[in-house]
Image: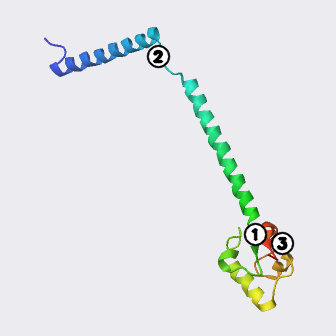
Amino acid sequence: MNLFTQQEKFIIKSLLGVILLGIFVTGYRHWFGDPIPSAEAEINTFKAAVNRVAVEKEKNLAENRQNQLVKSVNINTSNKADLMTIPGVGPVTAERIILHREDYGRYNSVEDLLNVKGIGPKTLKKIRAYIKIED
């Protein structure tokens, strides 16, 4: 009486062959070099890569912030598209700035923006660095 079918015998022999091959390869690497990388080394490499990416990202953010501060918009001569480049100023606020300028004349100071509907002290504080009055 046979305990296993022909297919089951083939599968068992194949599994034993794979296990023996794994033992042989591991022994070869152990005795003849080619060390198996440890998980700790892989984790350290990954952490170093993450740190490099984080530093590069922070560097890019700092450059972008500095570039934004350098680019200021003249509220007396700018069109709607230019005013919308100011962070926190959308199409409605830009239109209100232009309408106020047309109705009441040029802005004499940045504080004159407080007379525009939708711009309060908090908003003015955020956008002040991006605004200029004269060229």
Camera-nearest residue between 1 and 10:
10
* Residue 81 rendering spot, x and y as whole percentages: 65, 77
Hey, what amino acid is under mark 1?
Answer: Ser
Camera-nearest residue between 53 and 74:
74
N-terminal of the two: label 2 or label 1?
2
Tell me the number on the disc at residue 135: none
Camera-nearest residue between 131 and 122:
131
Q: Which residue is mark 2?
A: 34
Dots 2, 1 in contact, CB < 8 A: no
Q: Quadrant of the N terminus?
A: top left
From mark 3 to mark 1, how far is it between C-alphas? Answer: 19 Å
Camera-nearest residue between 77 and 3:
77
Tell me the number on the disc at residue 121: 3
Q: Quadrant of the C terminus?
A: bottom right
Horizontal placement of 24 versus 126: left or right? left
From mark 3 to mark 2, how far is it between C-alphas? Answer: 67 Å
* Residue 95 rendering spot, x and y as whole percentages: 69, 82
* Residue 50 rendering spot, x and y as whole percentages: 61, 39
From mark 2 to mark 1, how far is it between C-alphas? Answer: 59 Å
| Secondary structure of the residue carrying numbered label 2 | loop
The answer to which image quadrant residue 67 occupies is bottom right
Q: Which residue is mark 1?
A: 72
Q: How many residues crowd around disc 3 within 10 Å: few (fewer than 14), some, or many (20 or more)?
A: few
Q: How many residues crowd around disc 1 within 10 Å: few (fewer than 14), some, or many (20 or more)?
A: many
Q: Residue furthest left?
A: 1
Horizontal placement of 41 versus 118: left or right? left
